[in-house]
Amino acid sequence: MSSPDVPRGADEQSMALQQTTLDLQAVMLENQAILDNVATGIVFLKNRLVQRCNPHAEQLFGYAPGAMVGTSTQSWYSNPQDYDSVASDFYPILSTRQARTTELIFRRQNGELFWARMSGRIFDGANPLQGGSIWVIEDSSERHAAEAALRSATALTGAVFNSANVSIIATSTVGTINLINATAQRWLGYSSEELIGKATPALIHDAGEVLARSVELSREMGFPIMPGFDVFATKARLRGSDEREWTYRRKNGTSFPVYLSVSALRNEVGEITGFIGIGVDITDRRRADEAIQHANEVLEQRVLQRTAELEAANLQLKAEIDTRVQMEQEMRRMAHYDSLTGLPNRNLLNDRIEQAIERARRNNHKVGVLFIDLDHFKTINDTLGHHIGDLLLTQVASRMSFMLRATDTLGRLGGDEFLFLAPEVDDPEKLAVIASKFIEILAQPIAVSSHLLHVTPSIGVCCYPDHGTDRDTLMRNADTAMYFAKASGRNNYKFYTESLNVDVDNRFQIENALRYALVQNELSLHYQPLMDTRTNTVFGMEALLRWHSKTLGVLSPAQFIPIAEESSLIIPIGSWVLRQACMQVKRWREVHGQDYILAVNLSPQQFHQPDLLKVIATILSETGFPPSALELEITESSLMHNVKEVTATLHQLVDLGVRLAIDDFGTGYSSLSYLRHFPVHKLKIDQSFVRDIGVDERGMGIISTIISLSATLGLQVIAEGVETDAQKQELMQQGCHFLQGYLFSRPLAADEADRFLAIRRAAN
Ligand code: C2E
Ligand code: MG
Ligand code: MG
């Protein structure tokens, strides 16, 4: 550029001008280039109409190249107010030659709006509109958008920060609180001023929890962690964040649980600049958890309780079932087994017999049936009581059971009746062996409480098919045979035979007829003299009962006495005998002037009758018979049961003044030791031993033993059934002087006896 201060020639001037023009052109070109390429809209206006503009301005407002010139700026604005306000606010300021910038929303030709910064300058201050002005317009949409985004982001963050239902606490790297949101303030009851700048753990955390966590964390990390801010920071520092439940302490001292997530804050280069803790109040969750836990516990408790109840109910049910099963078993047992002895009862026996018959029929063998009845059991029951009777039955049952083979059945039909079933028998003779064994096995005395009891059985034997082909017949025939065994003296067995039925019929006939014997005056007494061989005199008479039945004829005592005993008819009959005999012998004592003694038989039934003493005393006093002349003959079997009671009765009888003799001595099982205590006066040697004299050494031995025994005990001894002189001599030699038997006299009717006494007296 040239200096205008240096004088120049015309050429020089023209050249200078030329040069200036060239320079100007260059400047204009440069300006044009700038205008064309600048990323800013530049517009020249006059009277608010576009005079010139650069391409960017055209782009900005959406005009085709050159199309913008001549347009009014009115179309630039999004509303007329902006257009107006530019006129009213802008131009006055621009007139003062000041620059003015504004940012407005502009409108493109296509209606699109955009933010732009606009600054203007006018050329002629006095004439701003017509003098022209230049406007620079920069699109600020992007910045605006960014700012708006930032603003809204900030607003959002702020909203989140303060209104989110979480506590947010930002701290420094050492735990000093830098920032605390509204929620945290509200929850903790502190204002932000009270917390900012303070160390967190001490203020809002539970000291115990922080301590416990520090111990736990130290162990986990392997290096010591102080119970302070490190408790929160360590994990966040290492892993970026740490999440767990904590307890926040409020300003008022109360506390609440939070789920706290602590994260490290880092700057662009990754350095930790602080920590932020975001906490969720988990009071409700805890409460819900607790409620759930409680509900679970309650439920569990209920389940346990219910289980226990069910178990108890189950147990009870089981117990009930057990009881029922037991009851059923018991009922079944009761239905088939005898409750006293445990042996099969009649029902089961019936079944077994039928089964046995059925099998025997198929296999062609025999079935044995033994009907076993205990002798004199009624006496035991009556004298010792049912309890002892029951115990005896139990022992008898168990004793007999020893003999059973696996296939045998022993059952109890009732009372003292037992039935033995041998379901497979080849030879009926074997049944005889079995019956003998039963007799043998019962021969030994049985100890029942303090008593030593003797029981003997009477056994009836029969077998299928010989004696019957059905159950009822077999049982009936075995029963019949048993009666026959009884009638034959008891303690034995009898096989059934056809003729037995007749005997049984007899038995019932006898019993029936016997009922009327007394009132019909069919009974009488015979008397058999009792001899003293030393003086050859009659010292007494034994009264022996005779019965001439109008219907049955003459029956022997052996035929009807057992029946009288079993039917208890012996009691009234016995009384009749005693009274009758007392009257008779009293008369003879008076008539013949001799102190005859009277021997009267007393059956076991009578001996055990409760009013025995009274009956005897009454008869003695009513007949006036001297008690000392009455000798009661009691069989051994009467004395064997219940020694204590028997001894007492004997003593009472002795106290009455009567004498006692043991009849048929040697046939029973008298214990010698008891004998010593019995206040008896005489032993009567049974006629079976007398019969053996000169025949059986053993019988003889027994006689001499009885004789020396009576001497030892200071008892009298008499032998009965003396029929021969040899017997008489032998007995006398042995020292037995009192004798009775056919050798001297048969039992005689009263008038015969009277004559006998007269003759005898005359002889002496
Ligand atoms: P006992 O008391 O042993 O009577 C003796 C039995 O032997 C009597 O039989 C008698 O006639 C019989 N006798 C007497 N001497 C001889 C003899 O030399 N040879 C033989 N073979 N027999 C002889 P009896 O009269 O038939 O009486 C039998 C049993 O009946 C008696 O045996 C007695 O136990 C019982 N008895 C008789 N009368 C009564 C009574 O009034 N009451 C009771 N309870 N039983 C009586
Ligand atoms: Mg006698
Ligand atoms: Mg006798």
Image (cartoon, rainbow, N blue to C red):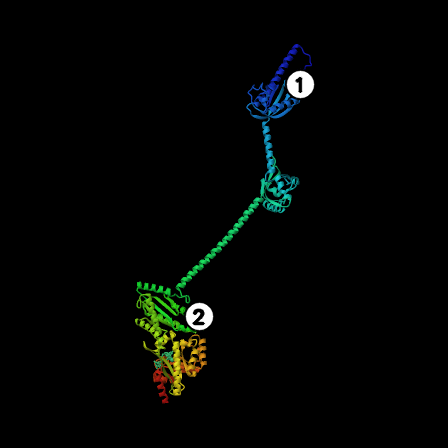
Q: Secondary structure at mark 2?
A: helix
- Looking at this view, is 729 or 172 the one in front? 729
Q: Quadrant of residue 645?
A: bottom left
Residue 229: percent from left, percent from top: 63, 43
Nearer-the-camera pick, 458 or 509 = 509
Quadrant for the C terminus in the image: bottom left
Point 34% across, 64% down: residue: 354
> Can residue 257 be seen in the rendering of this structure?
yes
Would you place residue 586 above or below residue 260 in this image? Answer: below
Residue depicted at x 50% and y 53% = 306
* Residue holding disc 1: 126
Q: Residues within 10 Å of mark 1 (few under 14, many from 20)?
A: few
Rendered location of residue 517, percent (x, y): 35, 77
Residue 687 in the image: x percent, y percent?
36, 80
- Give the amino acid type for the residue marked by disc 1 in the picture: Ala
Tell me whether the residue at label 1 lies in contact with that at label 2, contact meaning CB atoms closer than 8 angstroms: no
* Rendered image quadrant of residue 232: top right
Q: Amino acid at mark 2?
A: His
Label 1 SS: loop
Disc number placed over residue 387 in the picture, else none: 2
Q: Examine the image and state in which quarter residue 488 appears.
A: bottom left
Residue 672: mark: none
Q: Confirm whether residue 669 shows in the render.
A: no
Say left or right for 665 vs 170: left
Q: Residue furthest front?
A: 519
Cα gap from disc 1 to disc 2, whole angstroms: 157 Å
